[in-house]
Image (cartoon, helix red, strand yellow):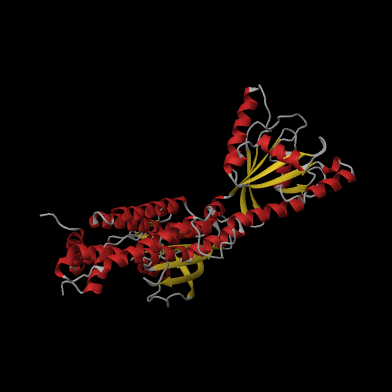
Amino acid sequence: MCRTPLQEMWSSRRCLKMFSQDPLKKWIHHNVRDTIFALSSGRGKCGVAVIRTSGPASQEALHLLTKWRSLPPPRQVKLASILCPKSGELLDKGLVVWFSGPHSFTGEDCCEYHVHGGPAVVNGILQALGCLKMLRPADPGEFTKRAFQNGKLDLTEVEGLGDLIHAETEVQRRQALRQMSGELGQLYQTWSQQMIRALAHIEAFIDFSEDDNVEEHVILAVDEVVVTLMRGLEEHLKDNRRGERLREGVQVVLTGATNAGKSSLMNVISQKPTAIVSSIPGTTRDVVEATLNIGGYPIILSDTAGLRESEDPIEKEGVRRAKARIGDADILVAVIDVSDGLLSQEMILANLQNLYPSLQEDGPRSIIVALNKVDLLSQERIVNLEKLCQEPRLPTLCLMSCHTGEGISNFLRILRDHLEAICGDPLQGAPTITQTRHRHHLTECLDALRRYNVHRQQDLVLSAEELRIAHRHLGAITGRVNAEEILDIIFSDFCIGK
């Protein structure tokens, strides 16, 4: 006889209960985990280094390294002489902090040794821990992995911690810290709980409606929950990839005709000779990149080949790559040499359209027009260009000279304003999607909810399956997918099977 999903879960639940009630199996489950150790601070000479252990043998290791007969108070710093367990030789005098599980980063018994950061001291203590048979060196990321496995962090918080460690700018730090605090995970967990309750109700209706234990209005309530979830997901996905751009770096592309001053601007912004500058047209043949921090926002600045027709196969390839990079740009900086002749509003628009014929097809795009080489102009022409900058039909215009540095600070201010418009303030508003992985699962979750509505009037079992798929994708983001929660809600909400 075929089992319903609910009956399958109930059978699994009984197995889990039997496992948890077996003392031998509980003892095995507790002791399968090794005790690990590693240097938690960065390598190299430093004032203080932190060496951490985690696992059931942390207490024994602490006794062997310090000769203490009892554990120190948890989360209190205590001075200790750290000794070699084999020879008894003094390795260092440092501070020891004991964390009793589950009140620790990993959820296990942990100990931290804050010692002098010289390589000899650190290596000596690591070797002392390594000679203890009940300890082993930690794998990369294993402390954080255990924190996740023990329910101290969900996957979004783990990713936030990783982003915080790798954050290079102030705004990246803010976004990572907010995600690590669990705000993004809490949003997804709220949706997940709503989805679990809806799934529990529809499962109960399928399996128990014939016994009149579940009324039909329950399904209508599920429909309302699905509509609410779809609206929330759609709004969350309409974020213009702000979080991902901030995490990975905003693509800023310098483009324009040959000898307009793109490479010079690249070097001025980078404050180093990143690109080769020459009076010979077509010097830049490939895309030259630099990762920079502009006002706290990370950017990937790309200098590209000058856009012109050429028979040179190498230059043609450079132009092709330049156009491809233009298509990927978040911010396009069109560099124009204003010393070539008079400029008007129509000429600038025509220039942009000739250089970038796909702009109208691509829709709105963040564009800055850098009018370079103003140091070669008369005051009268500069005044005329300043008036041109006020034209509302034109993109943002900026007068500048890469040779003298005039207008560069204004250009950087304009660039930062564009970055802020794209990325926003990560501390304001709802938390944003920061990973491509999140966006994939959220999109799949939304698609499953839409299919729920398609199947709703035809087959309730198929609708329930789509709801289960949606919940599975949402749970994949945080790493928490538990069928047991569905059973708990069924029995608490409907008192079935008492």
**Residue at the far bottom in the pictured view:** 73
Between 315 and 32, which is closer to the camera in this rendering? 315
**Residue at the far right in the pictured view:** 379
Q: Would you identify the image quadrant in which residue 334 lies?
A: top right
- In the rendered picture of this protein, how many numbered marks are placed on residues? 0
Between 109 and 159, which is closer to the camera in this rendering? 159
**Residue at the far front in the pictured view:** 457
Q: Would you identify the image quadrant in which residue 338 lies?
A: top right
In this rendering, would 354 be left or right of 236? right
Between 196 and 407, which is closer to the camera in this rendering? 196
Q: Would you identify the image quadrant in which residue 155 lies?
A: bottom left
* Quadrant location of the C terminus in the rendered image: bottom left
- State the residue at coordinates (61%, 35%): 323
Does residue 197 appear in the picture of this structure?
no
Between 55 and 278, which is closer to the camera in this rendering? 278
Across and down, in percent, residue 451 comes to 33, 52
In this rendering, would 443 be left or right of 348? left
Figure check: 409 above or below 232 = above
Figure check: 236 above or below 333 = below
Across and down, in percent, residue 242 comes to 55, 55
Across and down, in percent, residue 199 comes to 28, 63
